[in-house]
Amino acid sequence: MRRLSAEVLAAILAGALSGVAGALLFATLHAIIIVPIWDRMTSGLVFGAIAGAGAGWAFAEWYPSAVSTRTKRRVVGGARFGALLWLAVTPVTGADALMRAVGLASRYELVAVAVAILLALAGGGVLGWLVSHRFRGALAGAVAGILLVVAMSGPVPVGRSSRAFGIFLAVFPAAILGGIALSVLSPSIFSWIARGRDQQEIATDDA
């Protein structure tokens, strides 16, 4: 089996760390807007790391040069990446709110779940294609989209209260923070991985 490229591996590792940072920010905002959830954060951090890893793969497929090089605009690029990924899955919450408003979500739960899954995959996939114009970019985007929705515990019921809508909006800064952390951490992790692989190849050649 072909091993992952240094760019993809670095972005996945950086994304996992960034996902944890984003989950912590979301938990903080949740505590401010509704109630503290620190006692339930273990699973939140795990899912945040998984979603971040998926986002890292998408980042590597969409912006491979941003993983391997340090640019002056990496913070802006990371923030844009996080914002775009959040926007890509907003139709999931919008469709859920519409289905709840007309009473379909409660009557046909499996249909509501299927719609959420399809919209998450389609949103991330379409965004990936528009950015990269490559199948792998679209596939990575689709994976990132569905993992982000899973990390959010599914669509946020924004129609229930203003606080629920506030929680939905709180995912936005968390996604931006995660994107920034991803873009900042990736080059350093890439350098570490590339250096380690170079040393391994030298050792193999000398053997």
Image (cartoon, grey):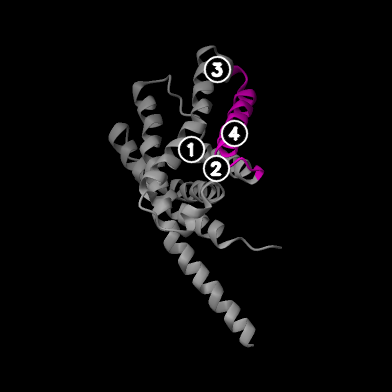
- The answer to whether 36 appears left or right of 191 in the picture is left
- Give the amino acid at mark 2: Ala
Query: Is residue 66 visible to the viewer in this orientation of the structure?
Result: yes
Q: Mark 2 or mark 4, which is nearer the start of the sequence?
A: 4
What residue is rendered at 46% in x and 25% in y? Answer: 157
Find the distance from the CA under tag 4 to the CA under tag 2.
12 Å
* Secondary element at image label 1: helix
Labels 1 & 2 near each other (Cβ < 8 A) = yes
Q: Nearer the viewer, mark 1 or mark 3?
A: 1
Residue that numbered label 3 is attached to: 99
Which of the image's four quarters has the C terminus?
A: bottom right
Q: Looking at the picture, which amino acid does disc 4 mark?
A: Val
Magenta residue span: 106-135
Which element carries disc 3, helix, strand or loop? helix
According to the picture, the residue beneath numbered tag 1 turns out to be 85
Mark 4, mark 2: which one is toward the viewer?
4
Disc 3 crowd, CA 10 A, few/some/many (<14, 14-19, 20+): some
Percent x, y of residue 25: 34, 44
| Distance Cα–Cα, label 1 vs label 3 | 23 Å
Q: Report which residue position mark 4 lands on.
A: 126
Q: Earlier in the sequence, mark 1 or mark 3?
A: 1
Residue at x-position 46% and y-position 28%: 156
